[in-house]
Image (cartoon, rainbow, N blue to C red):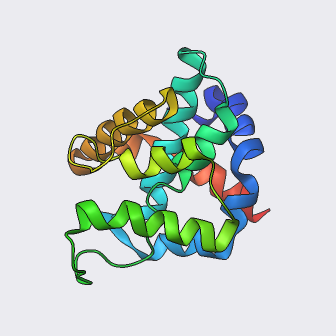
Amino acid sequence: MTVAKERANIDRFLEYTGDLLRDQSVQSMKEYKHHREVSTHFHSLFVSYTVMKLCERFHAKEERQIVRAALLHDFYLYEWYTEKHEEKHIWYHPKQSVKNIEARFGALSEMQRNMILAHMFPMSYETPASTGAWLLTLADKHCATSDYTGVSKRFMPVYEEINKRIEA
């Protein structure tokens, strides 16, 4: 994935998510490991960027709202490998992400809430109830697999370009 070929997609992605990406809480996601050495920040950008491209391919309505929810789907803000909760991380983190999002950015739409709560389907308590929720669920599985196998490194040039433009 080259930055030159992705320039228009990067522009659109930043139009949708630039304000969120500049937020210190979102930036703090760089501190948390998600899949092995992959940070929650990298994974979330990779997932939401993938979701944006899927939205275009499948002509999804409300693309901006879907991409923003996808970016924040793992906004749980804790080190899940070491910090334990009453529930296992797989069930706990979507609910914690919703709480953190609404505390930081305000109320989610019903679609966005379902997207985040259902993104671990079929292991989640919720079932995806919209195109956006299904796209997030599928993209998350694809990107998580890519994180564990090292294939997600191909996204690194785009990730670095997005971060460079956010910091500018």
Q: Is residue 149 visible?
A: yes
Question: Which residue is painted at 63% across and 48% down in the image?
Answer: 109
Q: Which residue is more in the foreground, 132 or 155? A: 132
Question: Which residue is painted at 45% across and 51% down in the image?
Answer: 116
Q: Which residue is more in the foreground, 145 or 141? A: 141
Residue 99, image x, y percentages: 51, 70
Residue 139, image x, y percentages: 39, 36
**Is residue 117 positioned above or below 63 on the image?**
below
Residue with the most extreme top position: 58
**Is residue 109 positioned above or below 102 on the image?**
above
Q: Which residue is more in the foreground, 31 or 161? A: 31
Indicate the quadrant where residue 119 lies.
Answer: top left
**Is residue 131 positioned above or below 110 on the image?**
above
Residue 120, image x, y percentages: 30, 47
Question: Which residue is painted at 35% across and 33% down in the image?
Answer: 138
Question: Which residue is painted at 55% across and 41% down in the image?
Answer: 111
Q: Is residue 156 visible?
A: no
Residue 58, image x, y percentages: 53, 15
- Determine whether, in the image, residue 81 is placed left or right of residue 25: left
Indicate the quadrant where residue 20 lies.
Answer: bottom right
Position of the C terminus by quadrant: bottom right
Tally of marks? 0
